[in-house]
Amino acid sequence: MRRVWSRLQAMLRRLVGRDASDADLSEELRAFVEHDAEAKIRSGMTLEEARRAALIELGGAEQVKEHVREARAGARWEGIFRDVRYAMRSLGRAPGFSLSVIGNLSLGLAAMIVAFAFINGALGPSIIPGIPDQDRLAEIGILENVRLGRMVRLQAARTALADHPDVFRTLDEGMPSLAGLASFTESDVAVTLPQPRSLRAAFVSPSYFDVLGVRPEIGRTFAPEEGGAAAPVAIISRALWMREFGGDPSVIGRPIHAGGQQTLEVIGVALQGFAGTTGRLGVDLWLPIAFVDRVAVDDPFGQSGTRVIRYVGRMRDGVGVDRVEAELGVVARRLGVARPAGRPFGRLVASADASVERVTVEVSGLSRQNVDELALMVAVILPVPLLVLALACVNAANLLLVRASGRSREVAVRLALGASRSRLVRQLVIESLVLALGAAVVALPLAWSGVQLIAAFVMLPMPLDGIVVAGALVTAFLTALGFGVVPALHATRQHPSAALGTSPAGSGGTRAEARGRRVLVAGQIALSLGLLAAAFQLTSPLESLAEPPGTDPDRLLMASFDLAQLRFSSGESDAFYAALLDRASRLPGAEAAALSSHDFATGWNNNLVPVDTGDGPRDPLGRPIGLLVSASSAEGDFFKVLGLDLRQGREFVAADRRDIPEVAILTEHFAAQIFGGAALGRSLRVSTSLIGEAEAEVRIVGIVESPVERNIDNLRGPSIVKPSPSGEVAAIFFPSPLQDGTARTLSVRADGPAGRLAPAIRDIVAQIDPRVPILELATLDQRIPDSTQIIRGLARAAAVLGIVALLLASIGLYGVTSYGVAMRRREIAVRMALGAQTDRVVNMVLRQALTVATIGAVLGGLIAIAGGVVIQAQLFGVPGVDVATLGGSAALLAAAMLLASILPAWRAARLDPNLVLREE
Amino acid sequence: VADRKDVVQGTLELLVLRIIATQPMHGWGVMQRLRYLTDDIFQVTTGSLFPALRRLEENGWASGYWDVSENNRKARYYAITKAGQKQLAREKQHWKSITAAVEKVMEGA
C-alpha cells in the first residue's frame, strides 16, 4: 500500500514539476562527475585529464537522462503525450506533406465509412420511423402459392373480407404470447379535403395504434368499438395535417370525403414521423378496416372481395419469436392452413403442382429484409472501398518514406544521442496515428455527403451512428499501423554512423521495391483513366435519353388519373374521360389531345402484355408463349399527339370502341419483327385480364411509325420483342383499354410551351367532377424516366470514383517521384555541380515520372475501351467509347499527372549542390 | 575488460539496496563501493545505475535527499527505507535459495 502511495507521489511530482526533476537529475550527474574527477586527481591525474575521464565514465549526460526517464513510472504515458505534441509540431512545420497524406487517407477512410454505413443499414435492424420498440413486433404472414405463367410463387395470401373478423379472432385468441394483435391493408384513395387528393390510406383494426405504440399528436386514436362501419372516423398523418391544413387544430371534427361517396370525421393526427408500417410508401390516412369495400381500390390481382390483409402483433415481455411460431403452428390448423415442416423462416419453396390455396404461415419482423441478397450486395461492393483504402495506404507509406529519407539525419542524431530504436519507432508511428486521426476527422463529413448521395439511390437507411464512427476510428488506427510501421522501421534501421558519416540515402529499399511502387502507381493511373472514361461515356447520352426524338417533350402536357380511387363504375369513368378528352382538345392553345391506358412517360416497356401471334415461340409442352410487347389504348388524336405517322392501313374510328377490342394498330418495328412487315389484315390473340385466361382476338388494321425510346436494356428473355438498335419500340395499340381499367393518361400537344396549359386542365377536371384528383400533371420533359435516373446515378458514381482515383493516382505519382528525387539527391547535386542545367534536371525527373504515367495511361486506355464495350452491351442507347471520351479523360489525367510530377522536379532543380554535398 | 562482468539482470537493484543499507550514499559512492566489494569484477555503467536508483526511490525502498558530501560537495544521497529493508530481506532470502539451488546442481552433477 505504501509502495503504491509513494509511487503515485513520485508520479504526481513528476507530472507537476517535470522540469524541476530534470534539473535535479542534471545537478546529480554534475556532482557525480565532480566526485569522480576529484578521485582521479587524487590518484595523480591532471585536472583536465580527470575531467575528461570522468565525463567518459559518465557516458553522456543526455544518454543517462534518457535511461532514467525511461525507467520512471508513468514515463510511457508521459512519453506518448510528448510524442503526440512533437508529432503535431513537426507535422505543422511540413503542411504540404501533412495535407497530402491526410487528403489521401481521408479519401480511403471516407470510402470505408460509406461502406460501413451501407453494411450497417443493410444488415442492421431497419428502423421504421415513428414506431417504438420495433424488435418486439412480429408480423404474421399467411402465404399462398400463386401461379404466374409457368412459375409458382409463394406470396402473401388474399383473404376474403368477410372472413377477416374470424381469422383475426382466431389468431388473437390462439396466440397468448402476443400482448396485442392488429390487422391492416393499404390502398390509394381519392379524398376530398375539400381539394381533391390521392392519398395512401391504411384500413386498420381498432387495436392498430395501440399495438404499434403510436400516440396521437392531437385528438385521439381509434376506440375499441370503432372497428365496424358504424363509426365513420379517420386519423391523418402529421405531414398531411401540416401540408393541407397548415397545422390548424380545428381539423379535429372536420368532415372529409373518401373514395367518392364516404364521409368521415377526422378524430386525430398521428404523432410526427409515423407514416405506416412500410416506411417507404408513406401512409397519410387511417380508416377502420370495415371501410375497405366502400373506400379502397379493389385489389386488381385478387378475386373481388379479397385482398392482402397483414397481421402484426406485439410480443409480451420475455417472449421470443419461437414461442409465437409455436403458437401460430397450432392456430394455423384451426384456420385451415396446412403448414409444411421445414424451414419456418426465409423463403419457403413451393412445389409447382401445389394448388393455389393458403399453404403456410410465417412469423417475421415487421420490416424483414432479404438478408442473403443484401449480404451479396455487401460482398460485391466492399472490395471497392477496400481497394481505395489500400491504395491510399500505399500512397501514404510512400510519402512517409520520402519524409523519412529527408529526416534520416535527425533520426541518426537522436540514435547517436542515446534514444533507443523502439522509442524512435514509437514516435514515428505516433506521427502516423496523428495523421490517420486527422484523416478520420476530414473523412467523416466527406463520408456523410457520400452517404446522402448513395442512400437515396439504394433506398436504404444508412445511419452514420456510433458504431460506424467507432469502426472508422478503428480502421484509421489500423491503417496508421499499416502505412506507418514499415517506413518507421526503415527509417530507424540504419546505423547512426552510416547516416551521419556518408550518405543520407540509407533508407532506400531495394530496386525491386522501387519498381513495385511504380507499378502500383501505374495501376492507379490506369484505374482512374478507366473510371473517368466510363463517367464521360455515361454522361454523354443523358441529353438524348431525356428527349425522345420527334416528340418536342416541352410541348406535351400529361395528366394521369385513376378513377378506381373514387370507385367509379366503368360507365361513370367512360363518361368522365369522354368529357375530359372533348374539352381538352378544344382548349385554346391545344393542337391535339389523346387518352391512353398506359402512361408512356414512365417508359414504353413498363406495360408489357402477352400477345400470341399463332407462330411465336412455344414452351416444351407446345403451348404458345405470349410475346411480350408494350400495349396501350390509343384514344383521340393519340398518334398526332405523339407525332407518329400512319404508315399503312387506317387509324381508329369511333365505331372501333368495344368493351373487348376487336382491332389493333402495330408499330412498324413490331410488324417487321413478327410478320416480316406483312401484318396488315392478320390477326393475333391478346390476353385481356391480369389473372385468368381471358383472351381476345384482334385484327390488325394499321401500322404506325415506332416511337423511339433509349433505355436501359433491362428486357431479357425469349418472349420479349426487343427494341431496334436505334430504340424503336415494339408496341400494340387498341381503340379502348384492353382490361376494363379506370386509369388513363391525358396527353395534350400545345402550340407552344405546354406548361401554361396546366391551370386550364385543372379547371376542366374540377368542372367535370371536383372530386377527381390529378395524380400527376407535368410536361413530358419534366418527367425524366426512371431509367435515365439510373444512368445518371451510375454516371455520378463513376465520376466520383474517377475523381477519387485521379486524386489518389496524383498523390501516388507525387509520392513516388518525390521519393525518387530524395533518393537521388546526391546524384542530382553532383550532376549540377558538374554543370548540368536546371532544365536538364527537370527533364530527368519528369521523364521518369511521365514514363510511369504513360504506362498507366496506356493500360487505362485499354481498361476504358474494354469497360466501354461492357457498358454498351448492358445499357441500351449508350454509345461506345469514342475518341472524344478517351481524349477528354486522358487530357484530364495528363494535367493531373503533370502537376503531380512537376512539383518534385522543380524541387530537384532548386537543390543547392553545395548544401547537399556538404551534408555528405 | 574481458574479466569484468555485467551485473546479472535484476540483481543490480538488490546490490544497490544492500550497499545503501549500511549507510546512506550518493551515486558515485555506490558505484565505487560496488567495484570495491566485487574486486572490480562487476562493472556498472551510469546508464544503469541512475535509473536503478530512481526505481528504488519510486518503489519507496529508498529515499533521496540533498546533502553535503565528505569533501564538502553537494550530492544527492540515497537512504534505505523501512519498506526497503523488508524488500532487501525478501530479496536476500530469494537470492540465497537460488544460489543454493545453482550450487547444488553445479556440485552434484
Image (tube, coloured by chain):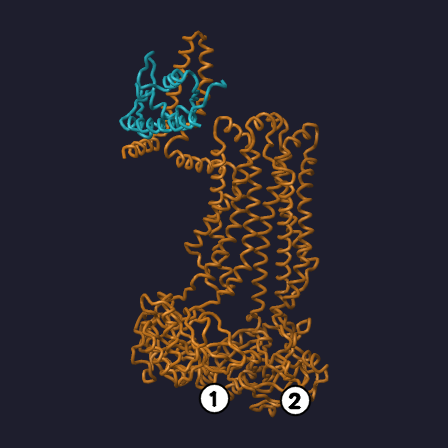
Estimate the x, y position of residue A170 in percent, counting from the top left: 35, 80
Q: Identify which residue is drawn at 44% across, 68% down.
A: A368
Name which residue type carries label 1.
Ser
Position of A578 compared to A314: left or right? right
* Residue under pointer 1: A569
Residue A814, above or below A45: below
Residue type, numbered disc 2: Arg
Can you identify the residue that label 2 sits on? A699
The quadrant of the image that shows the C terminus of chain A is top right
Neighbourhood count class around disc 2 (C-alpha, 10 Å): few under 14, some 14–19, many 20 upward: some
Residue A31 visible in the shown view: no
Outermost residue, front side: B108
At label 1, counting other C-alpha atoms closer than 10 Å, the crowd grade (few under 14, some 14-19, many 20 or more) is some
Q: Is residue A791 above or below residue A902?
A: below
- Look at chain B in the picture and name its colour: cyan
Asked if residue A326 can be seen in this view, the reply is: yes
